[in-house]
Structures are given as structure tokens and as C-alpha cells.
Amino acid sequence: MALPKLNASPTYELNVPSTGQLVTFRPFLVKEQKNLLIAIETQERRDMMRAIVRTIESCVEETMKDLTIFDVDYMFTKIRAKSVGETATLIIPCEECNQGSEVPIELERIMLQGEVVDNKLIELTDDISVQMRYPTYADFMDNDKLFQDTSLTETILEMVMTCIASINTLEEKFSTKDEPREELVNFVESMSAEQFEKVTEFVNGIPTIKQEADFVCDHCGHHNDRILKGMDDFF
């Protein structure tokens, strides 16, 4: 005789930010939570990202393709809120003494900041332009350099190359996925400061989850007014 099922999971709806697709999801169960906790224990960012995406794929009924990083961040916070409670307690360092304080965060109030403008065409010269796109979860998982402890400049350079979908001339369109990495590096490094600023503006404008964290430090009494941004701040 089969064992009884404990609970019938309720379902909820949300929109995938990058596409507007309406999907139905359930809260995650102990089996998914176990995988998340194991990933947290490893302290490896790649393991945590993989566990988060697998949780989303398990909990969402519909098939989704090419989720962006901000899709993953936003969807996971919504699923997490319905799974373990709408309030999470984070340890946030004080900007004055750098000691951590326990700060309750209302997950349902986390918002996505930034306008979704994918496939933006940026003119670099009169006859050369680049088509920009948002990086997907797969892009990050396949790029070892984005998980290395590198300088901010190197990280931005890597993000710019990840976001360039194609390089266009008046006669031809070059898909970056078909070009050697060395060629793409040379192309980006040959940009003028003004041209590079145009493409980094797109990178800096990639939507991200955010919420204000207003708290008094438990250790020194300093009043902190922080803006939490991205999954690294919330996970």
C-alpha cells in the first residue's frame, strides 16, 4: 500500500520578467530545500546558482528557456516567499563597524529595478554597431571567469563581452557565439573610452532585484540605510 501524501501544494502565478510569460509555481518542498542547504554549505557561488535554478525548474509547471540572471533572482525570491515565509532574516554588516546584525526582510516587497530593454542596438561608428542582449543563466554557468576573484574592471569587461550578441557592419552581421574569444576581446579592447561607456551603460542597466534595509547596528548603534541588490545580497 502506498503511503499517503502529506499536503496538496497550493499554486501561485508570476510573470517571467524578461519575457512577460505567465507561469504557475508551487512552493518548494523538503527535497528542494535540502539541495539548497547543501549548496549553501559549499560556499561555492556556482553550486548555489545551480541549486536555485533547479529549484525554479522543479517548482514551475511551464517550460522556460534562456532565463536571464534577473529572471532567476526574481522568480526564486517569489518562490522562496511562498515556501518558507514572507520574511527572511539576513545578517547584514554595519557600514560603520562592519559587524553583522540580524535584519528582517520582507521578501514580497523585493522589487525588480530597471527597465527590460533586450536586444538593444548601440551605434559605435557610422558603419559599426553592436546588438546587446541580457546574459542568461547558462552564459554565467559556462563562463569560468565570472566566478573567479578578479578585479572590477575585468569583471565589467567580461560582462560586456557576454552581453554582445552580434557585431554589425553595413554589409555583414557577425554573431559573437561563432567568433573566437580572442577576436571578441580584441574588438572590445579596441573601443574608445566613449564607445566602451555606451556598452557598459547597457551592462549597468541590467535589471536587478532590490530592497531597502533600514536598521540600527546591534553592536555600535549606527543607523544604516542600505540598498540590497542582486541575489548575493539576499541569499
Image (tube, rainbow, N blue to C red):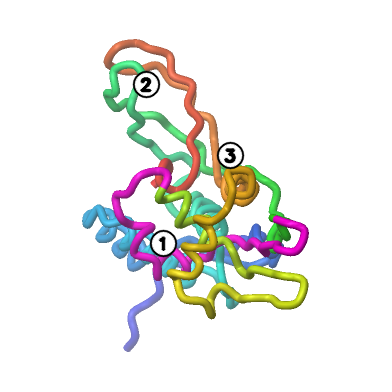
Q: Quadrant of the N terminus?
A: bottom left
Horizontal side, residue 79 vs residue 148: left or right: right
Up/down of 95 relative to 209, above or below: above
Q: Earlier in the sequence, mark 1 or mark 2?
A: 1
Residue density around tag 2, few if under 14, some if 14–19, many if 20 or more, within 10 Å = some
Q: Which residue is mark 1?
A: 52
Which residue is tagged 3? 109
**Relative image position of residue 166 (x, y in whole percent):** 63, 70
| Front in this rendered view, residue 53 or 128 | 128
Tell me if residue 187 comes above or below residue 222 in the rendering: below
Nearer to me, 71 or 87: 71
Q: Position of residue 147 (x, y in %)?
A: 33, 57
| Amino acid type indicated by mark 3 | Arg
- Going by the numbered disc 1, the residue's amino acid type is Ile
Amino acid, disc 2: Glu
Relative to 169, 96 lies left or right: left
Q: Which residues are magenta?
A: 125-153
Label 1 vs label 3: CA separation?
20 Å
* For the residues bearing labels 1 and 3, Cβ distance under 8 angstroms: no
Is 172 contained in the magenta span? Answer: no
Check the image and name the residue furthest to the left: 42
Name the secondary structure under disc 2: loop
Which residue is found at the position 58% from the left and 43% from the top? 193
Say which element carries label 1: helix
